[in-house]
Image (tube, rainbow, N blue to C red):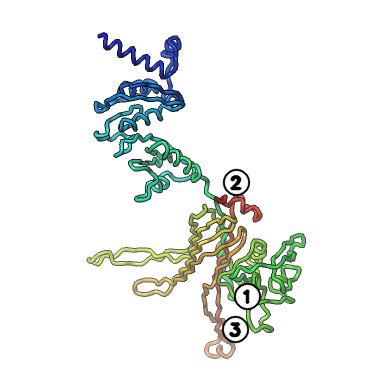
Amino acid sequence: MTGVHHSKKWQSVLLLTLLGLSSAAWSQAVNVPISSLNAIQKRMAFSFQDVPARALLQVLGETAGVNIVADDSVTGNITLNLKDATWQEALDVIARSKHLRVEQDKNTYFVRGEGFELGNGSGAANTSDGIYRSPEVIELQYQKAEEVGKMINTDGKSFLSNGGAVIWDNRTNQLVMMDTPDRVNQMRQVMRKMDMPSRQVLIEARIVEAEDSFSRSLGVKLGFNNASHSGFTTITDPLDSSKTISVPVRSGVTVGSTLSNVLGATGQTSDTTVGNMINFPALSNSSGTSAANFALSLYSSGLSQFVNLEVSALETDGKGKIISSPRVVTSNNVAAVIEQGTEIPYQQQANSSGATTVSFRKASLKLEVTPQITPKGDVVMDVDVAKDSVGTLTSAGYTINTKHVKTKVKVENGGTVVIGGIYQESTGNTVEKVPLLGDLPLLGNLFKTTNKSTSKTELLIFLTPYVLDEQGHPLAVSNTTLLAQPEK
């Protein structure tokens, strides 16, 4: 009975020493509930000399308001002197010095010796070195917890220490890490830099079906050797004289003062040598060469407005038609897909019994664009264009005519890239006849003429990317570099 009384008295003295309270203060403190979280995070001094480890663990549990269950394998005494340390750090030091394993299950900590296996508690990580590993919850705002968790714990390339573990909750988008405090703090710093909102890009696409002469009439071509322009000239919109714009031109190129002069008028010179930044309609009679047709053409942001005007006038002039003008917003390095078309049914044999099923095959125009914003604010686009159409009818069903273009190109913010080279040729017959007389049997052929005509059209894809700011507004070209990542 006396031994029990002295043991309780000794534990009370330890607790008073740990908290730094006088007897009067202790009598007041016992009536005040202690928050476990605040007690664990509070920094204090720990000073014990040759104290039984089991008793010290019990005092720590009472200090933080948590349950600590020590296994029979926890034996021996310990001397502990810590200044300005948290409860968690004190428990970590004890576990390391005594080679203990700590397993947490909600508000209860199970402490076992190195030779004992850990249980299957929900908050524990299996370890083999006896080092205590604290659980930490990291909430992500923008990145997906599952993707980040898999990246942290990739086989053979884990960011965790030996015995560390990470799990994630897709519902709350949280990561739960079980590792040493130092490693957890390092991962917190990494997550703080990674968990940033993705930059976004608005992609304007115009899918145009035009006469094969349209690309020559537009007559603007960018060389592939990044030759720079030598100056600017001011161009006036003929429909609205109040609208002007500065256009980059090469030296030796004479440009008219209105848009009609720029886009297909006379009085211009042309330089068709490789490396031209801008090449206006060529004078094929004098040079012996014609302007290049579209295959892959680039326009600066300054010329994009006039390209839009020319495309809008395409249908009015009867030189083609705009099939589709979709707009889509996508995140940086995330593919945007635009698809338009039909599905053709066909029959196929399902099994050896001869039963057939109906399947569908797409005949569509599909555009897939993956933008990537460069540090300088330009946009690199992976472009994949597929134009499928219905072909001839066979015994197995309709054939599909496929045309496919895939490329990668860099465009400045607000600039335009044109992808062409997909042609389609069609033939038709036109009949000219004298009214009434041309409809007479037999003799009618004398009063009518049948002409066979062939037309060739080109499919052109106009893509204009706009980098968006945090509010979702297109960013000015001069401010694009504000989105660049800081240099390391």
Q: Residue at x 53, y 73 (%)?
A: 421
Mark 3 or mark 1: which comes first in sequence?
1
Q: Is residue 479 shown above or below 12? A: below
Residue 375 pos. (x, y %): 57, 55
Dots 3, 1 in contact, CB < 8 A = no
Residue 342 pos. (x, y %): 45, 64
Mark 2 secondary-structure assignment:
loop
Mark 1 secondary-structure assignment:
helix
Q: Residue furthest left?
A: 353
- In whole angstroms, how far apart are the C-alphas of marks 2 and 3? 61 Å
Q: Which mark is residue 119?
A: none
- Left of 417 or right of it: where is 341? left
For the question of whether residue 315 can be seen, the reply is yes
Q: Residues within 10 Å of mark 1 (few under 14, many from 20)?
A: some
Q: Residue at x 30, y 11 (%)?
A: 6
Name the residue tied to disc 3. Answer: 432
Question: Mark 1 belongs to which amino acid?
Answer: Arg
Mark 3 secondary-structure assignment:
strand
Mark 2 or mark 3: which comes first in sequence?
3
Q: Which mark is residue 471?
A: 2
Dots 2, 3 in contact, CB < 8 A = no
Q: Quadrant of residue 107?
A: top left
User: What is the number of callouts on the image?
Assistant: 3
- Left of 224 or right of it: where is 36? left
Q: Residues within 10 Å of mark 2 (few under 14, many from 20)?
A: few
Name the residue tied to disc 1. Answer: 216
